Amino acid sequence: MFIEIPLKEDGTTSFVARLKAHTVLAAVCGFEQNSVSGVGTFYDFLDGLWLGDEPAKVLREPRRKKAKKPKGGEKLLEEDTGRVAYLANKVLEGHSFEEPETLLHTVLTECAVKPSLNFGLCGGSRKSVFAGDGTSLETGASHLGKRVCLCKERGTYQCSCPRVYTGPTANWGWDSYHERWFYGHTLYAITAADSYNDLPLLLHLTQASRHDSGTFAVACVQLRQLYPEVGFKSALLDSAKFPICTLSQMVTFACLQKHPAIRRPGEKFTLGAPPSNAL
C-alpha cells in the first residue's frame, strides 16, 4: 500500500485496477501474474491494521472552537494540569497504553526502524537522542455534520441539536505555527535526532484538542515498549512538554523556547521518583 502514495492514485479501487493492468507493478507489490486480490480484500487488510472500534458515523452535539485565540506563536494551554500529572505518574509507574495504531507501530518498527538501527542510520543504539513534536492533521470530514432535526424547516438555522458526523474522533485544535484553528487530529511524531537522517521512530495519532504534554506522556510509553533495547539519553522537545520535563532522571529534556504560562500562577506540579528502569 505504500506504493500507492507515490503513484498518486485517487483511491484503492483505481490502485487495484492499475495493479491488474501492469504485471511489473503487481510483482513489486508481491502478487503473481493474474493473482491480484480484489478491492474488498484490500479494504479488509486496511481495516485490520487499525485496532480501534470507532463507528464510521456518530450522532453527537456540535463541537465549537474556542472564541478566544492564543497570542501569536503561543500554544493552547492545558486546562486540566492534573491530567498531565496523572499521565506522567502512570509513565513512572510503568503503565502501558493500548492505542488503535499499535499494529502499525509494530510494522514500522520491524520493517523500517530496526533495520535502520542495524545500519546505524538512527545514531547510536546505546545512548540515543530523539525529538518529538505534534503537527495538525486536518480531516476531510465536515465540522458542520449533517442535520437530522427539523429546526431549519422551522426557521432556526443555528441550533445545538445532535448531528451525524463522519469523523467521530475529530475535533477543533489550534495550529500555533499557522496561527489558525483546524478541525481534525494531531499527528505526534518522534524522530531519531542523533543523526542527519531524522528518521521516524513513532507516529501517534490523537485528537486535535489534546495538549502536547499529555500526548508526549503516552507516546513516551509506546516508545519504551517498542524499543526496550535502545537507551535514550536525551530528548529535544518544545515548551509544551515543560510540565513533564522531570519525567525521568535518565533523560535530559531541552525546552527549545520559554513558555512561562504553562502552569497557572500558584499551581504546583510534582512527580514521584522515577523507577530504575525508566526510559
Image: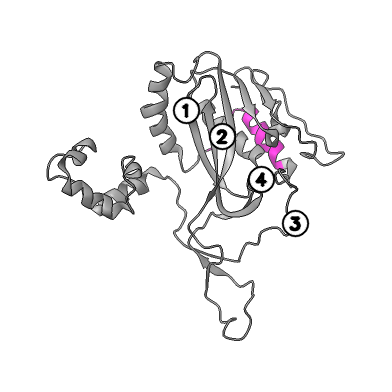
The residue type indicated by label 2 comes to Ala
Side of 277 where 22 appears, left or right = left
**Residue 240 x %, y %:** 69, 37
Residue at numbered disc 1: 199
Residue found at the far right of this picture: 266
Side of 217 where 126 appears, left or right = left
Q: CA distance from mark 1 to mark 4?
A: 24 Å
Is residue 200 found inside the magenta-colored segment of the image? no
Q: Are marks 4 and 2 in contact (CB under 8 Å)?
A: no
Q: Are marks 2 and 1 in contact (CB under 8 Å)?
A: no
Residue at numbered disc 4: 176
Q: CA distance from mark 4 to mark 2?
A: 21 Å
The residue located at (56%, 82%) in the rendering is 150
Q: Is residue 114 above or below residue 5?
A: above
The residue type indicated by label 3 comes to Lys
Residue at numbered disc 2: 219
Q: CA distance from mark 4 to mark 3?
A: 13 Å
Label 4 CA crowd tier, 10 Å (few <14, some 14–19, many 20+): some
The residue located at (57%, 42%) in the rendering is 135
Element type at marker 4? loop
The residue type indicated by label 1 comes to Leu
Label 2 CA crowd tier, 10 Å (few <14, some 14–19, many 20+): many
- Labels 2 and 1: the sequence-earlier one: 1
**Residue 130 x %, y %:** 56, 25
Q: Quadrant of the N terminus?
A: top left
Q: Which residues are magenta?
A: 83-97
- Labels 4 and 3: the sequence-earlier one: 3
Q: CA distance from mark 2 to mark 3?
A: 29 Å
Q: Quadrant of residue 182?
A: bottom right
Q: CA distance from mark 2 to mark 1?
A: 16 Å
Q: Quadrant of residue 186?
A: top right
